[in-house]
Amino acid sequence: MTGHERLRATEPAAATGALAAPERPGAGAGAAPADPVRGLMERYRGLCERAVDPLEIAVGLETDGLTDRSAARFRHRDVFSLAEELYARSPAPADESRHEHPPTRTQAASGPGRRARSWWQALGLLLPGALCTVTALALPLPQTGSSAPGVIAALGVTAVLLSLAYALRRAALSALAATAGTVLLCYALYGDALLGAALAGGPDTFPETASRCVPVTLAWAVAAALGCARWFALRARWRLAESESLSAFAASVRPLLALAVLGFAAAVGLLWQLTHGLLGHRPAGAEWLAVTALGLLLFVALLLCAHGFGRVAGQVLATAAALELLAPMLVFAARLPGLDPLGKPVELLTTAYGEAAVPALVCLVVATGALICAGRLLTGASAHRRPWPG
Amino acid sequence: MRIALLTEGGYPYARGESVLWCDRLVRGLGSHEFEVYALSRGRRQEEAGWYGSHGLPAHVRRVRTAPLWGEPPLTASRTRGRAFHGEPAERFAEHFSGLAHALCAPSPGTAEGRAADGTRPEEDRFADALYGLADLAAEHRGLSAALRSEQAVRLLESAAHAPSASRAVRATSVSDLLAVLERLERALRPLSLDWYGLRADRPATAREEAAGLAGADLCHAVGGGLAALPGLLARRAFGTPLLITEYGVRLREHHLESLAGLAGAARPGDVRTGARTGAAAGSTAGGTAGGTAGSPGGGSVGGAAGVRALLGSFQRRLAVEAYRRAEVITPGNAHARGWQERCGAERSRLRTVYPGMDAAPFVTVPDDPGAQETAPTLVWVGQCDPARDVRGLLHAFARVRADRPGARLLLVEMRTGADASCTRECRELADRLFPPSADGQAAVEFAELGGERVRTVAEAYARATVVVRSSAVEGFPPALVEAMFCGRAIVCTDVGAAAEVIGGTGLLVPPGRPEPFADACLALLADPGRRARLGAAARARAMELFTVEQNVAAFHGIYLELISRRSYRGPGPGLREQPGTEVKPFATTADGQLAVRLADGGQRVVAPAAGADGPSWAVDVGAGVDLARAVGAGSTRRSEAG
């Protein structure tokens, strides 16, 4: 009827606005219909139903060439008031329109390139464990007395550290967390021997390294930790897209967090047994607990770092490191006259359960605290924000 | 005078909106000093560099830029995760909650909005919250961490799920809230910038005052969106007058972008085309429009209704606040003016300033000699896309041909990287409608601008007996102005700002109807005298209204007017003029706060003479002190005091 619509009838569909409903040449036509806006509503049904603001409809109409002058034909002063009527008369947006782009769960598995990349990523995760195992297996091979063990150890440690840095490159570790984590690892390697020597009145020589099972287990645990962290992040993101409210989101993420932590602890326990089987050692209870607790602590710190709480993670790890170092300090301090009682608790603990009980206790206590903290922080929506490109 | 030019996604970046216009304005007003405060919209824009191969003009004293994209700036990221604690946290909660409630409130044009009326105006609520957040940002060096904190998510959620929230917002999911917050953080970055030269916790030194917006005499914002935000803050803190120039209304562009996001992958090209035509005035003035990523607080939003509703609401409330506070708003055409009035701009503050175009290449085009009576040529210049309706033009030309078999049509196409399918279709249609005649002379000639046959637009118009434009959708049509410069009679469809541009100096026909279009063309072809009269009138009109010179002169006048009413009473929150108080022109003059350039290149602001009521020269003239000496005395006074 109007020139605008006549044009529309001669134009291919591509000429009209992207949001216009499918063409209905007869819509709005006819000799002075009682309700001129109805035809317009039919034409712009898609736009009207999805609009959240009359101005959006106004923009859509203008994009299609409707002007204030043509709005007059619909008995409106301008496009704005016409858009307001369209908005008021269109039904409320249906519920499903909110999730027009539901999170696709199979996104990660699409495309051969992507699959190849994910294989490489998995390989990168396993690298520290593999390198550490090779080093541990190679160390006893050469005859004692030659310089070969030193060379092998140096090469192995370098390779493991490099692969570790590669595996953790995206974890956004804070400087404090990295330093404290290194201290904790060093204690896991030398701490028990140092404490034993200190209690025996030493140390007279450089403390011996802990059993080879400790570094091997921890190196494999890196893969488990990164895998669990990724699993948690992905599931939490799906929950985020589905959740209606923050409390519902927190409630749905809490079991995920618990599952991730339990799964990781189980994986470390299993790795400990496997490593012992591989290297032919007899597993010891307190050491198992110490390694598991340390792994758990590092895992929680990793989760915190990955979700933007690097500062908290640093504080947690620094607390644990300080408490662990306190044990030999107390033993040394007890040698001073008059300060004898200071060393008593450590001595009692070690005589009852062995030297490994000290790091086990410290890591377990701090890890529990960190878990409570993580349960609060990681169930918040802001922890799962994805950076917006652009 | 020191003019602070505030831009968002434009000048001085080469890729952006209104760049060419800004450059002409700055170059045209060489007697003023300019400081450019630019917000950039994306990495691509920053990488493309600044406009102009020879750098900016010398009287652009300072350029400050800040990104509205990517991660928050360094100062904020160092304290990542460390939001406010204690009293600032409470203040943040109060203000941000106010902001969130204002954003979630139904828009005024809806039934919900009208039902909610009678309570406190949402504009005031939004403004109070915005300025509260600005104060907080100034005192605590940035809001980014707080806006990304869990506290902000909670506040936004409780506002969105409140019973007073609009229906679109009430069902917002958690991930939508996060998306909104992310964009809000970017949009509110101007609050955290150190552009203002004044800190709330201590008095600014003269050097600092000279270094920021505090030392500017006037803020000129290009666009009513985020670009106006620094201007609003400067106005509130220092009483700096704010001038807003909009060729494409920012709010409208935001909605276009979000509609483009809504249309998604289905047919993204169509709405983008609309965006380009709608913002044509901007591109006229800008020259190199397009190519910028989605803007913060806007951007391709995707389908989520809640996100679109909240961000649209933010843009609208910001625009309303900017229009409400600005001393003068200059829309580029009646369409922009309509949008601004819709958003509450007072008519008394609106001055339409048409974009200026360079007339030089066109004034040399000779008048139509009238010798082509047997083979008159209709010329169309433009970009071949559906909105230009070239097919309709071809149908209309078929009718013209039926009456005047000698008539020819020259279609000059500007290639702007758009797809060539429209051109192909048009060529096919032309072949069908006009089969090759015996004399071998094609009725319709397709040419590409810059090609062998038509090198420049002026050359195309020089061949024209009548210039035709058949657009179905149009913003501000620059090609029309060019045809007017050439003194050609025009037949044009009545769309967009065409009627406004052409006035009575051409023929307007309803869009999309070939018969009236053909009739108008035939009428002009039959009457050489009328063609000449219309052409001369069109040229005169264009030379009066649409030249660069008139544009620059208009802004020069507005600058002087604004500065004449400015009062320098020192910074303070109570600066907003009371309604009803009479403002005397030149009660305090700009030279009361003269910027004096020292030998070392630094700047110093000369304080107004203590107790002097009127202009300093009015006092000093009696003593026979010339201006230069007065300035010298002023600076010594200052240095003695310091």
Image (spheres, coloured by chain):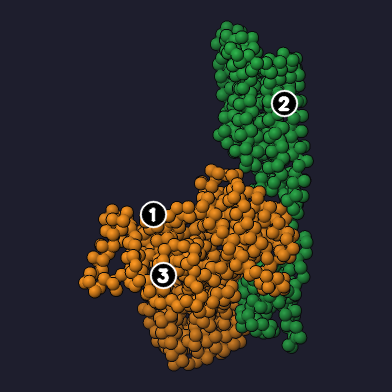
Q: Residue at x 29, y 56 (%)?
A: B639
Q: Nearer the viewer, residue B98 or B319?
A: B98
Residue at image position (41%, 63%) is B570
Q: Position of residue A339 (x, y in %)?
A: 61, 15
Secondary structure of the residue carrying numbered label 3 = loop
**In the rendered image, which residue does mark 3 sit on?**
B567
Q: Residue at horizontal 55%, vertical 16%?
A: A151
Q: For chain A, give the colour.
A: green
Q: Earlier in the sequence, mark 3 or mark 1?
A: 1
A301 vs B357: above or below? above
- Where residue B203 appears, x then y in whole percent? 43, 55
In which chain is the residue bearing label 2?
Answer: A
Where residue B129 appears, as percent x and y from the top left, is: 59, 61
Q: State the hue of chain B.
A: orange
User: Identity of the amino acid at label 1?
Assistant: Thr
Circles 2 and 3 in contact, beta carbons < 8 Å: no
Q: Which mark is residue A292?
A: 2
* Apparent side of residue A322 relative to residue B73 in the rendered image (left or right): right
Alpha carbons under labels 2 and 3: distance apart: 72 Å
* Image position of B592 with respect to B598: above or below: below
Q: CA distance from mark 2 to mark 1?
A: 59 Å
Marks 3 and 1 sit apart, C-alpha to C-alpha, by: 20 Å
Marks 2 and 1 close (CB-CB < 8 Å): no
- The label shown at residue A23 is none
Camera-side residue of B165 and A94: B165
Residue at (68% x, 30% y) in the render: A366
Mark 3 neighbour density, 10 Å: few (under 14) some (14–19) many (20 or more):
many
The three-letter code of the residue at mark 3 reads: Ser
Chain of the residue under label 1: B
Mark 2 on the same chain as mark 3: no
